[in-house]
């Protein structure tokens, strides 16, 4: 390997959770990793996310009381994952389930502090092998001050600084003005902010996940280059031996003795790739993933013969656009009572409380029959009075927070329908039927509130169904809903060792992929909270263990 500007053992492209886990595996084996990040911030979508990892049979959840096993998890995946070809092969699923607990223990030995998100169910808990208790884990509250100057480089969700909260606390916090448990949860969360008076920076969710991983990398002096995008991969005799990376205005040829790990996210911010692969209509303005996710790594691997799969799949869900143009991913807001989602005819077409990936798919299916992009989230006064909406606290809706497609207000449903271009008679009929079902506590049309997952984001004070509340008290509100994405789910096809493969299934030596740069093992289904980050970290762990073994055998 001649004519290289820099040499390392493993080049890791991207800086999200999977990338940093991979770097730690390489470093702990006594080898040299190099992490290169395209943007000026570290953490990618991982740092902006809820930070949960769906890892069945993991030791942290078992110690917290979860009854789980490989067999239960296998049965659950058999029930919920569709036949999606080699991306979701039995071999890849088995590797994920077998090595997931190992990865969790590996990080714990290094000093990573975990939290079991007990009470946050699988997304289909009633399916065989499903868990109402939940299999998600995440980082414990972390003091960002430990990152020193790197704290300012940690990516955060726009307009929302890191907060010290866990995902299994969010549902109670959403109804903090309604229940004693919610009020106590809010007090607990606010009490975690007190250390700020002494200069500490308590963080939860994705900030804790990436913050802790970054801290472990900094302790081990893992080199990290920011503002260093991948340009192309370098292959010799069919093997990837490095890559070209742009840094400080120069294109550097980097040799990677053990290979390259692509962990640079998907392509949700690449409009051309969206148009080519995703359902239509599709707009990058609806995406809430990290802005650097433009498919660079996927395209670089395709250029040397890599196969891709599931490119029409995404980790999507209902998204609204604030008056400032910021996309806001709806989770609890659409699930709480006193609200419905309707199409242009004013008709419901989904279980509003279901998994966001299902809602994304249902909106596209409906749009092929009736204009449903945008759809409209219709709320009545109690929804606004009782619950937060995005960054708006309960009961506060300033005029500056409203717009022609965001929190449109009217005193009657008919007037509201006319303002947003929805059929008034259709909306009035839909609301009348919905109100009858809400009073009885049974959604006969879409079964909203039947699942334990639905009820996780419900209001327990609303009886008899915590997800159903009639829309009858003015004023009424409407917000346009689009099928946006946390990230894309299709990408490079990999085997059970995380190796990128060609169309004929043969691995490309020296090339690995994980996270949203790789096609999902779940075939576009989201089994539970953390179904992106869980496999991302596990396959980074598997792939880099494979690199370590390969290098040791070569030596």
Image: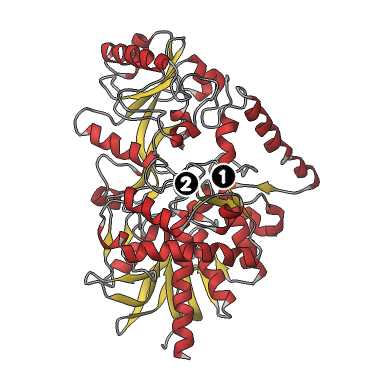
User: Looking at the picture, how far across and down is residue 57, in whole percent?
Assistant: 50, 57
Residue drawn at the location 53% of the way across and 42% of the way down: 158
> Considering depth in this image, is 359 or 476 the residue closer to the camera?
359
Residue 258, visible in the rendered structure: yes
Q: Which residue is mark 1?
A: 118
| Label 2 Cα neighbours within 10 Å, binned few <14 / some 14-19 / many ≥20 | many
Q: Which residue is mark 2?
A: 529
Query: In the image, is residue 184 above or below residue 544?
Result: above
Query: Disc 1 versus disc 2: distance between alpha carbons?
Result: 11 Å
Query: In the image, is residue 314 above or below residue 540?
Result: above
User: Looking at the picture, how far across and down is residue 383, in whole percent?
Assistant: 50, 20
Q: In what quadrant of the picture does the N terminus appear?
A: bottom left
Residue drawn at the location 59% of the way across and 75% of the way down: 28
Q: Is residue 198 left or right of residue 502?
A: right
Give the quarter of the image for residue 451: top left
In this rendering, the label closer to the viewer, 1 or 2: 1
Give the quarter of the image for residue 553: bottom left
User: Looking at the picture, how far across and down is residue 426, in whole percent?
Assistant: 26, 15
Q: Secondary structure at mark 2?
A: loop
> Considering depth in this image, is 35 or 542 the residue closer to the camera?
542
> Considering depth in this image, is 130 or 424 the residue closer to the camera?
130
Residue 524, visible in the rendered structure: no
Residue furthest to the left in view is 369
Give the quarter of the image for residue 372: top left
Query: In the image, is residue 253 above or below residue 518?
Result: below
User: Looking at the picture, how far across and down is residue 89, in whole percent?
Assistant: 30, 62
């Amino acid at each position: 390997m001649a004519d290289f500007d820099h040499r390392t053992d493993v080049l890791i492209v991207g800086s999200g959770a999977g990338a940093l886990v991979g770097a730690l595996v390489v470093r702990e084996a006594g080898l040299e990793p190099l992490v290169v990040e395209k943007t000026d911030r570290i953490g990618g979508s991982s740092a902006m996310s809820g930070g949960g990892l769906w890892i069945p049979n993991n030791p942290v959840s078992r110690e917290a009381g979860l009854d789980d096993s490989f067999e239960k998890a296998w049965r659950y995946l058999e029930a919920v994952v569709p036949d999606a070809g080699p991306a979701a092969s039995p071999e890849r699923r088995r590797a994920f389930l077998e090595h997931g607990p190992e990865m969790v223990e590996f990080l714990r030995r290094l000093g990573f502090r975990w939290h079991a998100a007990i009470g946050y169910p699988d997304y289909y808990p009633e399916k065989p092998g499903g868990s109402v208790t939940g299999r998600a884990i995440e980082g414990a509250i972390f003091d960002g001050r430990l990152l020193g100057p790197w704290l300012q480089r940690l990516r955060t969700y726009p307009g929302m600084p890191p907060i010290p909260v866990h995902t299994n606390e969010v549902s109670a916090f959403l109804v903090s003005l309604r229940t004693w448990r919610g009020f106590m949860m809010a007090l607990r969360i606010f009490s975690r902010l007190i250390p700020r008076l002494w200069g500490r920076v308590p963080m939860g969710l994705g900030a804790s996940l990436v913050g802790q991983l970054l801290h472990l990398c900094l302790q081990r002096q893992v080199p990290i280059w920011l503002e260093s995008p991948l340009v192309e991969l370098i292959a010799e005799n069919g093997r990837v031996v490095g890559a070209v990376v742009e840094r400080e205005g120069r294109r550097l040829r980097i040799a990677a003795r053990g290979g390259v790990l692509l962990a640079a996210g998907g392509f949700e911010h690449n409009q051309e790739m969206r148009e080519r692969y995703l359902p239509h209509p599709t707009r990058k303005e609806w995406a809430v993933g990290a802005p650097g996710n433009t498919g660079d790594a996927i395209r670089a691997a395709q250029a040397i013969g890599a196969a891709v799969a599931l490119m029409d799949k995404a980790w999507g869900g209902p998204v609204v656009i604030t008056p400032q143009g910021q996309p806001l991913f709806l989770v609890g807001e659409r699930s709480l009572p006193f609200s419905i989602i309707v199409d242009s005819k004013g008709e419901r077409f989904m279980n509003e409380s279901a998994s966001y990936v299902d809602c994304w798919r249902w909106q596209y299916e409906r749009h092929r029959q009736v204009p449903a992009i945008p759809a409209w989230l219709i709320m009545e006064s109690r929804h606004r009075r009782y619950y937060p909406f995005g960054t708006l606290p309960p009961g506060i809706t300033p005029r500056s927070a409203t717009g022609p497609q965001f929190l449109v207000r009217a005193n009657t449903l008919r007037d509201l329908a006319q303002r947003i271009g929805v059929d008034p008679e259709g909306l009035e009929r839909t609301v009348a039927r919905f109100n009858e079902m809400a009073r009885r506590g049974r959604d006969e049309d879409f079964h909203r509130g039947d699942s334990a997952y639905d009820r996780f984001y419900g209001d327990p004070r609303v009886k008899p169904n915590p997800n159903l509340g009639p829309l009858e008290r003015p004023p009424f509100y409407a917000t346009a809903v689009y099928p946006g994405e946390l990230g894309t789910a299709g990408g490079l096809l990999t085997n059970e060792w995380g190796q990128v493969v060609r169309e004929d299934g043969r691995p490309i030596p020296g090339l690995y992929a994980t996270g949203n740069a790789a096609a999902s093992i779940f075939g576009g289904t989201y089994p539970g909270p953390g179904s992106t980050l869980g496999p991302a970290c596990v396959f980074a762990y598997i792939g880099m263990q494979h690199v370590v073994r390969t290098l040791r055998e070569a030596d």
